[in-house]
Amino acid sequence: MVGRDKGNDEHLLWPKITIVMQMNLFEHIRKFVALSESDERILKEFIKPRTVRKKELLLSNGQVSKSLFFVEKGCLRMYFINKKSGEQITQFALEGWWLTDFFSFMDNTPSEYFIQSIEAASLVAIDRLVFDDLLKALPQLERYFRIIMQKNLAASQLRAKYLYEMSKEEFYHHFSSSFPDFVQRVPQYMIASYLGLTPEYVSELRKKNS
């Protein structure tokens, strides 16, 4: 009897969780473009809520990136294996961020990256096979994704400028002060990889600051 009750509870809770996840995405979209209630109903037909475990792989090297992921809760990373057989992180995605290998996603080609959850995460996925149909059904999302892409490009350009302009220590301090909560959530060696530093150097900087 207890087992059946627990199962019933999970069945009742899942639709509620799904609605919360989708509402977060809708709210994010409304920051940039208009989205009516009828638009929401259309959008629901194209998106798939997904939960992933900690350290679960969403994409592996050699696979085609089939989904564009929006992070409702949790954190993802994208990385490749460098010539020294080490993991080189190129991007993170926190709550409210999108992530995929866009070359693979748009061109249907094998990816050179891995995408993995750093924490247990709640995501919304859009399948590449329906992405163009979504933009046709809701034309304002073309502008939404353009704005998102522009912001991502601007952030990448600024990061490249800092990488050349700042010393390694200045670069680390700038990142830490800009994203203090993020630094607490992500393992030190991952931050070092993203910033192009060694874990040992980051450890020295932390000890120096303390």
Image: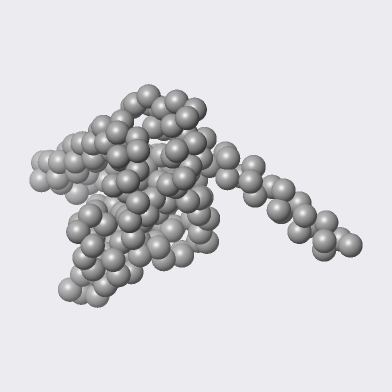
> Residue 10: image x %, image y %?
71, 54
Q: Which residue is drawn at 47% across and 30% down?
A: 38
**Residue 194 or residue 151, whichever sits in front:** 151
Q: Does residue 123 sit above or below 143 in this rendering?
A: below
The image quarter containing residue 137 is top left
Q: Does residue 15 sit above or below 83 in this rendering?
A: above
Can residue 193 be seen at all in this image of the molecule? no
**Residue 204 or residue 30, whichever sits in front:** 30
Q: Does residue 43 sit above or below 115 in this rendering?
A: above
Q: In this view, does 32 lie to the left or right of 111?
A: right
> Residue 113: image x %, image y %?
27, 64
Q: Quadrant of the N terminus?
A: bottom right
Q: Residue at x 39, y 32 (%)?
A: 29
**Residue 189 or residue 46, whichever sits in front:** 46
Can residue 62 be seen at all in this image of the molecule? yes
The number of numbered discs placed on residues in the rendered structure image is: 0
**Residue 36 or residue 148, whichever sits in front:** 36
> Residue 157: image x %, image y %?
15, 41
Q: Quadrant of the C terminus?
A: top left
> Residue 52: image x %, image y %?
51, 59
Q: Which residue is drawn at 30% across and 70% down?
A: 63
Return the residue found at the far right: 1
